[in-house]
Image: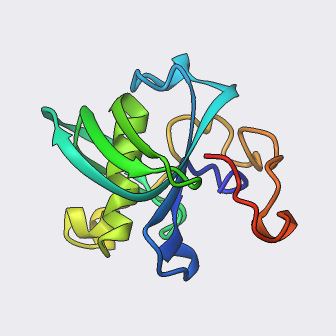
């Protein structure tokens, strides 16, 4: 996800048929103005069975997808959402989100429901091949450091990674 400059990933995108998403947003993510985002300070959400309980007013937002690399489009998304979910340790969680996090939650929950961003605009033919706006140099490999969180295979048997 990081290497591909993604913000989120849903389990079905990697062939795992579970309702789990991982989203990593930068500091300043409440704004859709990417010049305010700080990728050196991020917050990671690991959510089981996320469900949107509130959608605010809609706006057309630029969006891409790791399942359709290199393509972006404009998609109507709510500017703020409330989501209830469960952390990996089983505790319930409610998220009230704005900006990039609200957009990412809607996008990843779409994946859990079997939808791609191209479904929101009719087809991949309606999408453009341009890098996301926060990529200022399209030849750069990644906007942030590589993954430092231990993978599940590195976890001790029976342990649950933190949410």
Q: Please identify the quarter of the rendering in which residue 152 is found.
A: bottom right
Residue 157 relative to residue 43: left or right: right
Is residue 87 depicted above or below 29 in this figure? below
Residue at horizontal 42 percent and vertical 36 percent from the top:
101
* Front residue (pair 130, 29): 29
Residue 147 relative to residue 124: left or right: right
Residue 153 relative to residue 126: left or right: right
* Front residue (pair 3, 46): 46
Q: Please identify the quarter of the rendering in which residue 3 is found.
A: bottom right
* Front residue (pair 23, 61): 23
Is residue 91 depicted above or below 136 in this figure? below
Is residue 125 depicted above or below 63 in this figure? below
Residue at horizontal 50 percent and vertical 26 percent from the top:
34
Residue at horizontal 35 percent and vertical 38 percent from the top:
102
* Front residue (pair 11, 132): 11
Q: Quadrant of the N terminus?
A: bottom right
* Colour convention of the picture: rainbow
Q: Please identify the quarter of the rendering in which residue 159 is found.
A: bottom right
Residue 41 image offset from top left, x and y in percent:
69, 25
Residue placed furthest toward the left = 57
Residue 36 image offset from top left, x and y in percent:
53, 17
């Amino acid at each position: 996800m990081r290497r591909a400059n993604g913000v989120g990933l849903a389990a079905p995108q990697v062939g795992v048929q579970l309702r789990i998403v991982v989203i990593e947003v930068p500091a300043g993510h409440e704004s859709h103005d990417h010049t305010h985002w700080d990728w050196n300070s991020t917050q990671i959400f690991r959510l089981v069975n996320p469900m949107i309980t509130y959608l605010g007013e809609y706006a057309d937002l630029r969006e891409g997808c790791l399942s359709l690399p290199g393509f972006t489009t404009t998609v109507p998304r709510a500017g703020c959402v409330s989501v209830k979910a469960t952390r990996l340790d089983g505790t319930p969680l409610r998220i009230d989100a704005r900006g990039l996090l609200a957009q990412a939650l809607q996008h990843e929950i779409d994946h859990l429901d079997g939808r791609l961003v191209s479904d929101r605009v009719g087809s991949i033919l309606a999408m453009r091949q341009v890098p996301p706006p926060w990529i200022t140099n399209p030849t750069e490999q990644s906007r942030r450091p590589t993954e430092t969180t231990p993978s599940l295979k590195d976890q001790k048997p029976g342990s649950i990674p933190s949410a």
